[in-house]
Amino acid sequence: MGITKTQIFNKKQNKLATIFKVLAHPARIAILQYISNQKACICNDIVAEIGLAQPTISQHLKELKSIDLIKGDISGKRICYCINLKKWKEIQTESNAFFDKTKFNCC
Amino acid sequence: MGITKTQIFNKKQNKLATIFKVLAHPARIAILQYISNQKACICNDIVAEIGLAQPTISQHLKELKSIDLIKGDISGKRICYCINLKKWKEIQTESNAFFDKTKFNCC
DNA sequence: ATTTATTATCGTAATATTGCAATATATAAA
DNA sequence: TTTATATATTGCAATATTACGATAATAAAT
């Protein structure tokens, strides 16, 4: 169907899945790494760096924004995209809580 | 297109995206939590717990297996699915390395 | 005001994912 | 051997995602 039955899962499970889904594309991983490591954030530079068309990058940025992982500051006709560090830490914490709580076995 | 241009990204980026993709569904989150927290692992029990049809659960288990996140031990006509703790820790480490290396900003 | 540069949105084609019924496979029990 | 039980596979319908060309929107520069 392509549609996920979110109703049968709890909020935390859906939220965690959503976070992982946003991170589940190499272009979005690459964008985050580029923003962070090159300390650059101009949208146009990201397009040049990644190698995908501008509308495609714009779409990926939109998904990163959808969970507040990045924020865009307008500076003239350019937009500087930065990582939302508060949210970033929050997500890392949630992710680790999941990993730590889910490492026991019966066999 | 639905198809991802993996060629333009490096191995680490693609691998990380694949890991996140496997975790990017609430059913798979729920399966992992159930296996770990209830210390139960029989496939049929998972079907009863989660509330999705048996073929759907089987498919999700297959995806979890695709990156070695779980392993299935046959015990009679049943199969006991367990978390692969070695791989689990590996993934947590990789995930944290990404979070730690990607938290710097220019603005 | 017009032009130029930057980013967002729309529309669309191609592929991927989700979910399930039907069915196949495998093993234990009778 | 037949039957019952547990899991996997197949095939398919519906929806989601990815990617991009065309175009709109916005703001600086001329």
Image (cartoon, coloured by chain):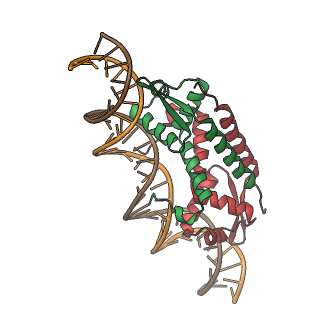
Chain colours: A red, B green, C brown, D orange
On screen, residue A53 above or below C24:
below
Q: Is residue B43 visible?
A: yes
Q: Quadrant of the C terminus of chain A?
A: top right
Q: Quadrant of the N terminus of chain A?
A: top left
Q: Is residue A14 left or right of residue C13?
A: right
Q: Quadrant of residue A14?
A: top right
Count of numbered labels shown in the rendering: 0
On screen, residue A6 above or below A51:
above
The image position of residue A76, as x and y in percent, is 72, 72
Query: Which of these two is toward me, A38 or A87?
Result: A38
Residue shown at the point (42%, 23%) measured from the top left: B76
The image position of residue A22, as x and y in percent, is 59, 50
Query: Which of these two is toward me, C15 or A71?
Result: C15
Residue shown at the point (66%, 36%) measured from the top left: A98
Residue shown at the point (62%, 35%) measured from the top left: B85
The image position of residue A86, as x and y in percent, is 76, 48
Q: Quadrant of residue A12?
A: top right
On screen, residue A46 above or below A18:
below
Q: Is residue D11 left or right of residue B43?
A: left
Q: Quadrant of residue B77?
A: top left
The image position of residue B17, as x and y in percent, is 58, 52
Q: Is residue B53 visible?
A: no
